[in-house]
Image: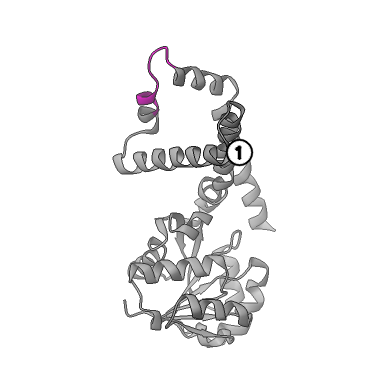
Amino acid sequence: MNDTIGFIGAGNMGGAIISGLLADRKWAAKDIIVADSRAEALTVLDEKFPGIRTTGDNSEAASSDILVLAVKPQVYQSVIHAIREDISPETIIVTIAAGLTLAAVADWFGESRKIVRTMPNTPALVSEGMTAISPGPGVKDEEIQAVKRIFDAVGRTVVLPESQMDAYTSLAGSSPAFVFMFLESLADGAVREGIPRKMAYEIAAQALLGSAKLMLETGRHPGELKDMVCSPGGTTIEAVATLEASGFRSALIEAVSDCTARAKELGKA
């Protein structure tokens, strides 16, 4: 890659993306510049990723070919107003803020810009993330692919129209919380039956990880894979019947719908 990537904000997600890019060798350290007002955060990055450029001046990062705005949503407007004169019209601007629409970000820039809205989820911190990418007007296919390569370094990516971003928020952005609740509940059940808690967490997490990988790598329908485990008259189908009677599926469907509705509300705020 010949593009330089700038990051404004050196938090957990920015650090995870940098780590993924360097581990994947898609960008050289010298092509990455990170700006943050916290000197201690930059010191940590210098130690962890030798060779990257760090600065306390957002304008330096804004001169990059691709600029990732990795700051909190509530400071986006002030950050953009401070750097918008320093950004080239050809710079690809990547947002990772939940709830901020392409139109809102474009309005803060005050003129036509190449903006790509993205939303990685927290598993990106261990390079197993899921990221949705929604390109704004004027972003070329090759520029979308350049952004996709960044997030491919920390997991998987999909390109979605912005109209589907609220539903994606439920499906991937918020769902890790549902998964952790599921894991905790599984472990609680195992503890009730006598398995030590730490071991129960490990077993449950590995079972979930392996199941997800089995579906992704085989491409088989989740219902088909479920049927493989459910022997006639066996233990698993008994447990499945209990979950069905308790509204397991409908609770998850309603959770996704409610989460999507709330995301839409926040996007209008």
Instruction: Give the residue at x 50% y 60%.
Output: 125
Q: Residues within 10 Å of mark 1 (few under 14, many from 20)?
A: some
Task: Find numbered disc 1 in the image and state the secondary structure of the residue it sits on.
Answer: helix
Instruction: Give the residue at x 38% y 72%.
Output: 22
Q: Is residue 80 above or below residue 144?
A: below
Position of the N terminus, as image quadrant, is bottom left
**Where does the magenta region start and end?**
226-234
Instruction: Give the residue at x 43% y 54%.
Output: 128
Q: Position of residue 181 (x, y in %)?
A: 60, 40
* Front residue of 202 and 217: 202
Q: How many marks?
A: 1
Q: Is residue 36 above or below residue 14?
A: below
Q: Is residue 168 above or below residue 40?
A: above
* Front residue of 85 and 138: 85
The quadrant holding residue 219 is top left
Q: Position of residue 201 (x, y in %)?
A: 54, 40
Instruction: Give the residue at x 51% y 69%.
Output: 15
Q: Which residue is disc 1 drawn over?
A: 255
Q: Is residue 112 left or right of residue 24?
A: right
Q: Is residue 149 above or below residue 78?
A: above
* Front residue of 139 and 246: 246
Q: Is residue 137 visible?
A: no
Instruction: Name the residue furthest top.
Output: 233
Q: Position of residue 87 (x, y in %)?
A: 50, 84
Q: Is residue 25 left or right of residue 62?
A: left
